[in-house]
Amino acid sequence: MKVLLTGGAGFIGSHTALELLNSGYQVVVADNLSNSSEESIHRVEKLTGKQVAFYRVDVMDKQALAQVFAKEKPEAVVHFAGLKAVGESTQIPLWYYRNNLDTTLTILELMLEYNVRNIVFSSSATVYSPAAQSPMDESKPNWCTNPYGWTKFMGERIITDCVQANPQLSAVLLRYFNPIGAHESGMIGEDPRDIPNNLMPYIAQVAVGRRDKLHVFGNDYNTPDGTGVRDYIHVVDLAKGHAQAIEYAASHDGTEIFNLGTGCGYSVLDVVHAFERASGVKIPYVIDPRRPGDLDLLCSDPKKANEVLGWKAEHTLDDMCRDMWNWQKNNPNGYGQER
């Protein structure tokens, strides 16, 4: 099967490309490289010994993306492309809505036009209501605290409605919790542009000397050590979940939602100490005020994915930190490419 990955040069997309190639899929990547590097695709090719058809296109550009559909004739789409920084989304909400919704609409229109049946959508745990109590299963109520989350919620709704109106389509919506880590080879990993928005790449950049210290936002949460607790998942486990989601979409009708998480929660300081163990480097940090909207605890209930997809996260927090450190120490400046 040939699979189109939109945003496939990014952190999760590149790891998914690798897993799909190793599972016998053909992979096509469409990415505008706004927050990624083509070097990630070259390294995926080196690791797998297989070629990726890469197109530098903006997924919002329907005419350009149509050329990819026409030439490559994919049988499924995994839709990663989109802006993803929660804080930034509150500052430039219109651009988040324009980008994240336009990409989804464009993909669905082209899928109908080119008779592509299956889509797997990169969604997020941010669609869950902060009033709901963890662990979150797929039936928990939805409500978002930021524009980024609303774009994921709306993307889910658009896809669900489109599938309902077009029974030839099949969709799987994957709600990620907190992806971290890197491929065990150390050749591909997370390489954010500018200041990292997520905890793990920030810690790694402190460890490698690119940043002076970690900023911990709040230590007065109702948690064992006062810092926020989250469900962290190894990016390789997450990537494998996409391969199983494609198989599920190909053999089932309608729309299905799955959480991808471990079901285990770790605090910010738990992650800091685990990274110190993995790297042998002391991570200096300071406590800053809480960020608006942050929750005490957010963890998944992955039972449905375990039972229905046959998927289960296998890596521990120590594995995640070990692999992230292996990536960062071998690539202190990330991919080091002009982006």
Image (spheres, grey):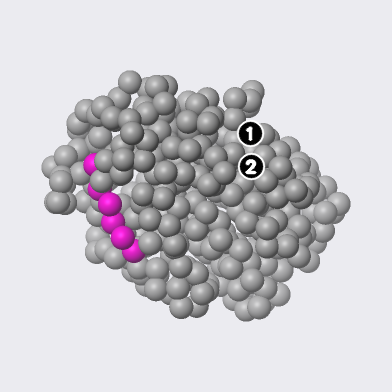
The Cα atoms of the two marked residues, 1 and 2, are separated by: 6 Å
The residue tagged 1 is 37
> Residue 19: x, y in percent?
63, 56
| Stretch of the chain drawn in magenta | 263-269
Q: Amino acid at mark 1?
A: Ser
Q: Which mark is residue 9?
A: 2
Q: Amino acid at mark 2?
A: Ala
Q: Residue at x 37, y 35 (%)?
A: 279
Q: Residue at x 54, y 63 (%)?
A: 241
Q: Residue at x 42, y 48 (%)?
A: 320
Which structural element holds mark 1? Answer: loop
- The mark tally for this picture is 2
* Front residue of 262 and 97: 262
> Would you place residue 63 above or below residue 115 in this image?
above
Q: Is residue 268 magenta?
A: yes
Q: Residues within 10 Å of mark 2 (few under 14, many from 20)?
A: many
Q: Is residue 333 visible?
A: yes
Q: Residue at x 71, y 42 (%)?
A: 46
Q: Quadrant of the C terminus?
A: top right
> Residue 126: x, y in percent?
38, 53
